[in-house]
Structures are given as C-alpha cells and as structure tokens.
Amino acid sequence: MSLARIRLSKRMAEEIRNAEMGSSAAATATSAKSRSLWPTVLRWIPTSTNHIIAAEKRLLSLVKTPYVQENVNIGSGPPGSKVRWFGSKSNEQRFINTVTFDAKDGAPTLVMVHGYGASQGFFFRNFDALANRFKVIAIDQLGWGGSSRPDFKCKNTEETEAWFIDSFEEWRKAKNLSNFILLGHSFGGYVAAKYALKHPEHVQHLILVGPAGFQAESTMPESLIQFRASWKGAILNHLWESNFTPQKIIRGLGPWGPNVVRRYTTARFGTYSTGDVLAEGESGLLTDYVYHTLAAKASGELCLKYIFSFGAFARMPLLHSAAEWKVPTTFIYGYQDWMNYEGAQEARKQMKVPCEIIRVPQGGHFVFIDNPSGFHSAVLYACRRFLSLDPDTESLPEGLSSA
C-alpha cells in the first residue's frame, strides 16, 4: 500500500471517528433537552412556585392600586430556636411572599393574614377599598402560597404554633414593623391571636374574621359525637389523624385537579354564593390561583392535625387564653359563617380589653369575598379610633349588627 493511500485511510478513519463523536454528543444533548422538557410537557401535577407567582400576578391585575411584591428573607431561624423548620442542615434561607400596596402618608398599617387552604390573593376584592385608608400589607404564611415551603417536621401542637408565630415575628423584624393592625381570617385568625398573645407590644388592634380555634373538643355537639362513633366517622377521623389533607386529593388527581378546583370555586362563589357572585373573569383567575397554591409541595397544610382535632376543634383553644388578652379586638362574622360566633361571645366575657363582635349580612365564611362592601364597612368601623378624629361619635354602619 502506498504512503499516500495510508495517509488517506488514516484521514478517513479520523473523520469517521469525529463524526461518530459529534453524533453521540448531539444525541446526548438531545436526550438532556428531552429530559428537561419532559416534566414541563407531561408533569403529573402541573404547578410550581413560578406558576403560583404568575397566577397571583394575574389575579392581582384586577386590583387598581399599585403594589410591590417581594420575598422577605426571614433567615433560617432565630438563634437557639427549637422549631424544627429552622433546623435546615444547609441553613437554607426562608422567605415570606409579601405584597404591599401604595398608601397615603401617615395611613395606619394593616397586615392581612389568610386562612387554611388559602393565600393572600383571596383578599383581591378588598385591596383597593382598604388601601384608600390603610397601608395594606398581605402575606402568604410560611409553607403556603408563594412563600417558602420547608419540609414540615413539627411533631406536636407547641412546635406547630411556633412554626407560624415565630416565622411571622421574623418577617415583622425583617420589615421593621411595629404598631400595626393585624387582621387574620379563619386559621389565620388563630395564628394572629396567638401572635398577639405572645407579642402584644407590636399590635395596635386585632381583627379576627371568622376565626378558628375558640372552641374545644369538649363543646362538640351530640350529633357530631354520634357521627364520630359510626364507621364512617371512624374512617374520617383516622384520615384526619393520619394528616390526610384536602390538598393531597388535588395532587392525587394530577392533570384533572384544576377541573375539580374549578367546580368548587364556581359553586362556592357562584351557584351557592350568599352574596356578590364572582364575575366570570374573577372566577377564572381565582380558580387558577387556588389550584396552584393547593397543588404545590405540602408544607404548612400539614399543621392541621396538630392544631385541630376532627371537626375543627382546637387542641389548645383560644378561649382558654381569653383572660390573658392584651390587645383590643374586633370579631367579624358573616351571617352564614359556619364558624360559631358564640365562641367569641364566651371569650369576651373573660377579656379585660375592649372587644366587639360584628356580623355582616349576605356573607359566609369568606365574607370578604361574599359581601366586600359590608366587610369593608366592618373593618373601617373596627379601626375608627385610628381613622376618625372623633371615634366616639361613630355608629355601627347600616346593615351590620352587633352580637
């Protein structure tokens, strides 16, 4: 074989080898690209933190008042804390998703805390009206909405309460807030009340909207006692104690989850609404938002069995702490709220601070969505000493009633 032919053979072999290597690299790149696209295209639970924030932004596009969204860093926990969410091996920084609305100079600060299974976007019908009189700040509690979702490692009621109370306090420090009005709805009302008991020096006034956690298991009605004794009740109680949450059902349904949520929001805030029915655009945006907040990683939702026994009776009832109350308080209930305002009446008897109970017509548990104008009137009346030059002359707005 001639030297030229040998050189030609070597060159051809090298080109073939390079072509094979290039083909292999291209195949690897294509495979990697395919793997990166696969979860997006065929994800069983079609959601993520980015989806939550995007859905929040779309929902809040209905609000005319300018606002700023931020992730407030609350660190990895106070030094020496025994709360398990602070025990990150990587010292991962946690954050609280926060929206702050433009306000007039000197306006009192109103911090709004959502309930169980909700997030701050649920107040979308209230932000404009309240921002006219307050500096409104709304948050997603730790483990909810667009906030950090650490693994939930609490093992008892005390640790679980500390998860929410201490993370809220770290948020307050990061925001450098003091002397604010604190409003909490449902489970958020429970957290707000527990926070005010521990840190009363920062809270000017407490507004509890259909708050959970005032009644103990000992007040359970006979009908529920009988139901819990039945086989159906025993199964449901077992699921409750196993921490089987409603959100697990939504995740389990995978791509069918959004349709189930749509049916719920359409029924609750449409067909069976006790007040102002959501417009089609509102309903669609709220549905999208609710789905993504429910289907995301389980975290704060796992508090349920540690805070409440089956039937939503508090394991450490607020009623037992009523005599220790240090912050003036206003309770707001919708007429059709399934939360019983009689628990607030019992607590008021033991309180040594000003306390009033306001009921709003055409409103259920989500009174701020069902009857926004009535809810706004109740909040403004509750805060009259911060808004009026002569609060003692203010009378209860027409349509509202005291309990």
Image (spheres, grey):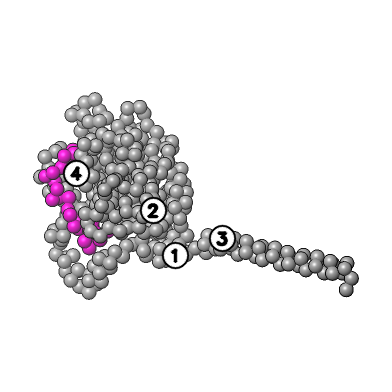
Q: Nearer the viewer, mark 2 or mark 1?
A: 2
Whichever of callouts 1 and 3 sits on the residue coming sooner in the sequence is: 3
Q: Is residue 318 magenta?
A: yes
State the image coordinates of residue 3 (x, y, percent, origin top left). Answer: 87, 68
Tag 4: amino acid = Leu
Q: Nearer the viewer, residue 300 or 100?
A: 300
Q: Are marks 3 and 2 in contact (CB under 8 Å)?
A: no
User: Which disc, if any, is residue 197?
Assistant: 4
Q: Residue at x 23, y 37 (%)?
A: 203
Q: Secondary structure at mark 1?
A: helix
Position of residue 140 in the picture relative to residue 62 (left or right): left
- Depth check, mark 4 against mark 2: the one in front is 2
SS for callout 3: helix
Please provide percent x and percent y for residue 374. Answer: 29, 41
Looking at the rendered image, the quarter that the N terminus falls into is bottom right
The earlier-in-sequence mark between 2 and 1 is 2
Choose between 243 and 335: the one closer to the eye: 243
Inter-mark Cα distance, 1 to 3: 18 Å
The Cα atoms of the two marked residues, 3 and 4, are separated by 49 Å
Q: Give the Cα distance between marks 3 and 2.
A: 29 Å
The answer to whether 347 is drawn above or below residue 272 in the figure is above
Amino acid type at mark 2: Ser
Callout 3, which amino acid?
Leu
Residue that label 1 marks: 254
Element type at mark 4: helix
Residues packed near mark 1 inside 10 Å, few (<14), some (14 to 19) or many (20 plus): some
**Please, what secondary structure does the residue beneath circle 2 have?**
loop
Q: Which residue is mark 2?
A: 90
The residue that disc 3 covers is: 37
Q: Which residues are magenta?
A: 304-329
> Which quadrant of the rendered structure holds the C terminus?
top left
Q: Earlier in the sequence, mark 4 or mark 1?
A: 4
